[in-house]
Image: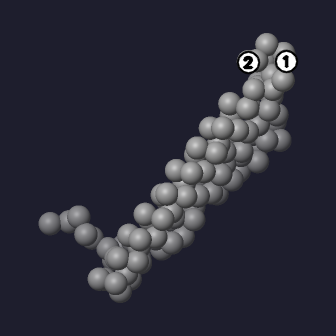
Amino acid sequence: MTPYLVLSAAVFSIGAFGVLARRNLLIVLMSLELMLNGVNLALTGFSRIHGSAASGGAAAAPHGQVFVLMVMAVAAAEVAVGLALVIAIFRTRQTVDTADISLLKG
């Protein structure tokens, strides 16, 4: 279980660093995907270890894997909406740099 959690924490940390340190919106979106994949690794690892205990020792219950599939579906929708927003912002502002974009400032 430890290698799964270490890898998951490393992938999540790389994604969190990318979100906090980078200024390009496309890199930020890719970093968010890394964070979601880190969480998916942890969910899959926990499901593999604790899945058989939840089902009474019989066949392993795939609750964690089902949740991972749901997270992946939400992530795909998030990427589609995020890329559409990035394209719309780029068409109006001609930049995808987060420091140059101040759409919500009055």
Image quarter of residue 100: bottom left
Tell me the element at label 2: helix
Q: Of residues 84 and 96, which is closer to you in this image? A: 84
Q: Is residue 25 above or below residue 75?
A: below
Q: In the rendered image, which residue does mark 1 sit on?
A: 58
Residue plotted at (34% across, 84% down): 91
In the rendered view, how is the structure colored? Answer: one colour
Q: Position of residue 83 (x, y in %)?
A: 46, 70
Residue type indicated by callout 1: Ala
Alpha carbon separation for disc pair 1 and 2: 9 Å
Residue plotted at (66% across, 48% down): 38
Q: In the rendered image, which residue does mark 2 sit on?
A: 54
The label nearer to you, 1 versus 2, is 1
Image quarter of residue 92: bottom left
Task: Indicate which disc residue 6 carries.
Answer: none
Image quarter of residue 48: top right
Q: Position of residue 97 (x, y in %)?
A: 41, 76
The furthest residue to the top: 56
